[in-house]
Image (cartoon, helix red, strand yellow):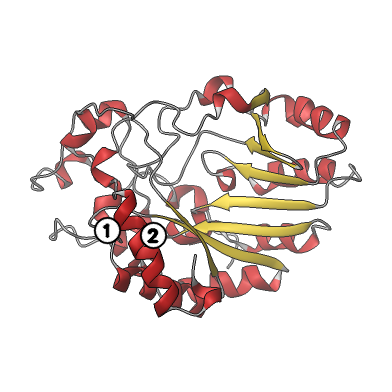
């Protein structure tokens, strides 16, 4: 894809008045977590259908205003696992960098919807503190770029980071967690692909797709080009009530991902962040679904 102005494509392209005909819409929820739907994702939504599985992921609803026992602002313990500004380490050998608080799309179930990004950004000071920390700990071999969405950073800033990472001999692998190839494919332009291709580190990209309807013809070239850079493509999904919590949807997703050269790797149970309880699937049902997937799918397609 040519070096088009991808910044325009990630702006919010849906206004409040376009949602007011939807009974489930609650403008008050936007005060807690802003509405943000990029151009490409908007084009895939059927706004005349309140049960559209893409719409449900991004539509502010009144349920978000309700409190629920066990739900909190930091459900995965990110803040307790901070090692330095924007650096989170929960497991041996790898660290996660909060590269930005910006996203191309605001998914209503996001487990970091209340995360204090302003105080936790690894990209400040040209990555200086981040690089110093990583260089000192020789047990670290993998760096995970997260956010927000790390691809909201310019390719120039990403290149600046990885040029420094490649100078640290014990860093071997770069993993990128992103929704951008799916929701804003213009981001995967020639400059971005050149950067990935030139990287000497082992490269993994974990995209985030919850339903087969998110994958369309326009994605074929995008994922083909990403694969050609030597990047391993994996997917992570969140199990979401009335969106993908059935065997047919999950099987269709696995098969379609594989058609695009992506392995279905993770299927997450919802992280209990404030305002997300209406997405929760009970653990018993989640386990039953996963067991059924094991009988319906070949092993390499079971997340």
Residue at point 55% right, 30% down?
Answer: 78
Give the CA distance from mark 2 to mark 1. Answer: 8 Å
Q: Earlier in the sequence, mark 2 or mark 1?
A: 2
**Closest to the observer, 195 or 255:** 255
Disc 2 vs disc 1: Cβ atoms closer than 8 Å?
yes
Residue at 47%, 27% (x, y): give it: 115
Is 165 left or right of 265, judged from the image as shown?
right
Viewer-side residue, 257 vs 34? 257
In the depicted structure, whether residue 275 falls above or below residue 215: above
Q: Count residues near mark 1 (Cα–Cα under 10 Å), then give few for <14, some for 14-19, many for 20+.
A: many
Q: Residue at x 19, y 36 (%)?
A: 63
**Position of residue 92 measured from the top left corner of the image (x, y, whole percent):** 74, 40
Q: Which residue is mark 2?
A: 210
Q: Position of residue 88 (x, y in %)?
A: 64, 32
Q: Nearer the viewer, residue 132 or 88?
A: 88
Residue occupying the point 79% across, 27% down: 128
């Amino acid at each position: 894809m040519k070096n088009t102005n991808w910044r325009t494509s990630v702006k919010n392209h849906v206004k409040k008045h376009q949602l007011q005909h939807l009974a489930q819409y609650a403008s008050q929820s936007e005060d807690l977590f802003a509405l943000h739907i990029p151009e490409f994702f908007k084009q895939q939504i059927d706004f005349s259908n309140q049960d559209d599985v893409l719409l449900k992921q991004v539509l502010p609803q009144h349920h978000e205003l309700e409190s629920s026992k066990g739900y909190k602002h930091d459900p995965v313990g990110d803040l307790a696992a901070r090692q330095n500004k924007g650096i989170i380490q929960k497991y041996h050998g790898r660290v996660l960098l909060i590269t930005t608080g910006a996203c191309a799309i605001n998914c209503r179930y996001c487990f970091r919807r209340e995360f204090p990004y302003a105080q936790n950004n690894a990209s400040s000071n040209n990555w200086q503190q981040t690089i110093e920390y990583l260089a000192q700990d020789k047990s670290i071999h993998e760096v995970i770029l997260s956010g927000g969405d790390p691809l909201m950073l310019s390719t120039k800033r990403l290149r600046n980071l990885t040029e420094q990472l490649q100078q640290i001999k014990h860093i071997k692998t770069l993993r990128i967690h992103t929704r951008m190839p799916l929701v804003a494919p213009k981001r995967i332009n020639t400059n971005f692909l050149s950067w990935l291709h030139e990287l000497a580190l082992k490269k993994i990209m974990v995209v985030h797709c919850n339903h087969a309807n998110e994958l369309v013809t326009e994605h074929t070239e995008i994922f083909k080009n990403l694969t050609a850079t030597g990047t391993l493509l994996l997917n992570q999904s969140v199990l979401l009530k009335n969106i993908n919590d059935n065997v047919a949807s999950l099987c269709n997703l696995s098969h379609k991902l594989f058609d695009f050269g992506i392995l279905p790797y993770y299927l997450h149970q919802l992280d209990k962040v404030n305002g997300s309880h209406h997405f929760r699937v009970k653990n018993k049902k989640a386990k039953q679904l996963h067991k059924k997937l094991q009988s319906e799918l070949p092993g390499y397609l079971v997340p």
